[in-house]
Amino acid sequence: MKWYYLKLGFGNVEAETRLKPSKPTAVIYFGMTTVNQCLAGKGQSQDFCRAGLPENREQVTMVVSHHGKIWILKPAGEVYHEPPKRHSNKDRYIPKVMPVKILTERDSLDVPAILAGIHANAYLGRGTFREITHWGNIKAIECVLGRGIPKDHVDEGPSQLLECLGSTELETLVAKLLESAGCFVEAYRGGTRLAVDVVAHNDQDREICLGTLVVKPKKRVTIQVKGWTDLVQTNEGVDYIVGLIEKPGKRALDSAWLLEQVKQKPPVAAWLRRSLRWLPEDYLDKWGI
């Protein structure tokens, strides 16, 4: 199975009109190239046209996100041409159109946060038909469709659980953990300083310790929260990195550290379980949250 993020038209403006339940279609442009030229080429246009071939349709799932809606689609026919059209920039394009089946259409508030925010992924957002490789998104798609977690992504460690959080959720989890340890956290999301996502203050006269994360009395620490990353050193002005770290260190704290600390704080563990309630209950149970 392959999963793709699809944008319909320039700036995704054709999402609402193309995905009408009566006869839904997907479209890409890519200049005056024909379907055969796309199939003989490479990249996104080839992937799109190949997805519509009979032998590939059952192995392709597509996601469209626009104006607070999420559509999950599958190819339902081969790609064909519509008459050439002229864009507002005066260039001419051949629309290459694929019949699709709408597997589900949801309000973005009714899907996992990681899927609702998929449009914020810079790599996907800059493309037209790009493969989704982040397993948090893939698990969200599969669970929304009722197909469950892919079998090859069930038992690979705490990162497999925490990658199911959206970026804002992951920052919130870290902030809640620090609050539960006795810190004052001024906001659950950064933005006032480059690379700093959470600022935690220790207003007490005693040291606050969460494993190797230490906040000295009357001091503060700055934290960068990351999804998958190979960072091993903090950026200037950042005391700790917390996230799905591949090579943890004294100041680079990985998913195993984070989940262990969360499990020691029942209210935070309850928040995490509630945030991930779209995952199967037995999967959540195995992580002790």
Image: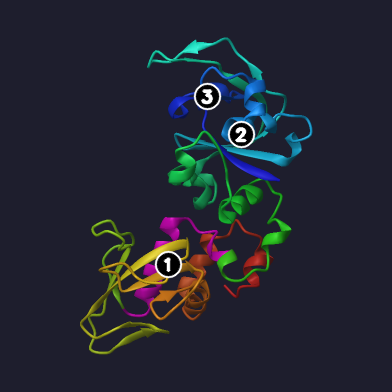
Please state which of residues 210 and 83 is positioned toward the viewer in this rendering. 83
- Distance CA(mark 3)–CA(mark 1): 36 Å
Q: Point out the tag, 2 or 3, that comes first from the N-terminus.
A: 3
Q: Which residue is mark 1?
A: 231
**Horizontal relation, residue 125 to residue 164: left or right:** left
- Is there any visible trace of residue 24 in the rendered image? no
**Horizontal relation, residue 29 to residue 99: left or right:** left
Q: Is residue 149 above or below residue 59?
A: below
Q: Which residue is mark 3?
A: 30
Residue 80 falls in image quadrant: top right
Residue 42 numbered mark, or none: 2
Q: Point out the tag, 3 or 1, that comes first from the N-terminus.
A: 3
* Type of the residue with mark 3: Phe
Q: Residues within 10 Å of mark 2 (few under 14, many from 20)?
A: few
Dot 1 and dot 2 residues touching (CB under 8 Å): no
Which numbered mark, 1 or 2, is in the foreground of this view? 2
Residue that sits furthest to the top in the current view: 83
**Horizontal relation, residue 8 to residue 252: left or right:** right
Give the residue displayed 62% in from the left and 67% down from the top.
284
Residue 2 falls in image quadrant: top right
Image: magenta residue range: 161-182
Give the residue displayed 54% in from the left and 17% down from the top.
32
Q: How is the image coloured?
A: rainbow
